[in-house]
Amino acid sequence: MADLGSLLWEAATIMVTGMVVVFVFLSILILLVQLLAKVVPKEPEQDFHPQTASTVAPDHSGVTPDVIAAISAAVQQYRQHKA
């Protein structure tokens, strides 16, 4: 059986190696993102022109009477069929 001290030393070595690898990877990732931000040009700002009120009044009458009649007939037919 291995000595406890050597097992702890091996565990610490693996832990530090993993931490260093993650640190290096994240550092490279940060540098690449910053480089990409400098290389890629920013999108030009689009001019925002709010829409002015139209002179024609919109039709807010809702559902037409023909549609209401069709729905009423369909509901009535459904109820008669189910009853």
Image (cartoon, rainbow, N blue to C red):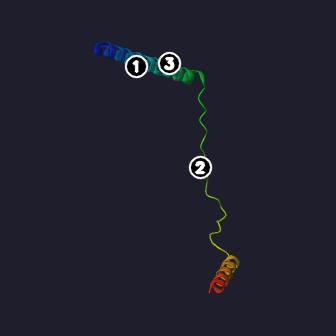
Q: Residues within 10 Å of mark 3 (few under 14, many from 20)?
A: few
First in sequence: mark 2 or mark 3? 3
Quadrant of the image for the N terminus? top left
Residue 32 in the figure: left or right of residue 19: right
Residue beneath label 2, please? Answer: 50
Task: Give amino acid for label 1.
Answer: Met
Pick the residue in front: 47 or 20: 20
First in sequence: mark 1 or mark 3? 1
SS for dot 3: helix
On the image, which quarter does residue 82 sit in?
Answer: bottom right
Residue beneath label 1, please? Answer: 19
SS for dot 2: loop
Residue beneath label 3, please? Answer: 28
- Residue 51, above or below 10: below
Tag 1 near tag 3, CB within 8 Å:
no
First in sequence: mark 2 or mark 1? 1
Pick the residue in front: 19 or 74: 19
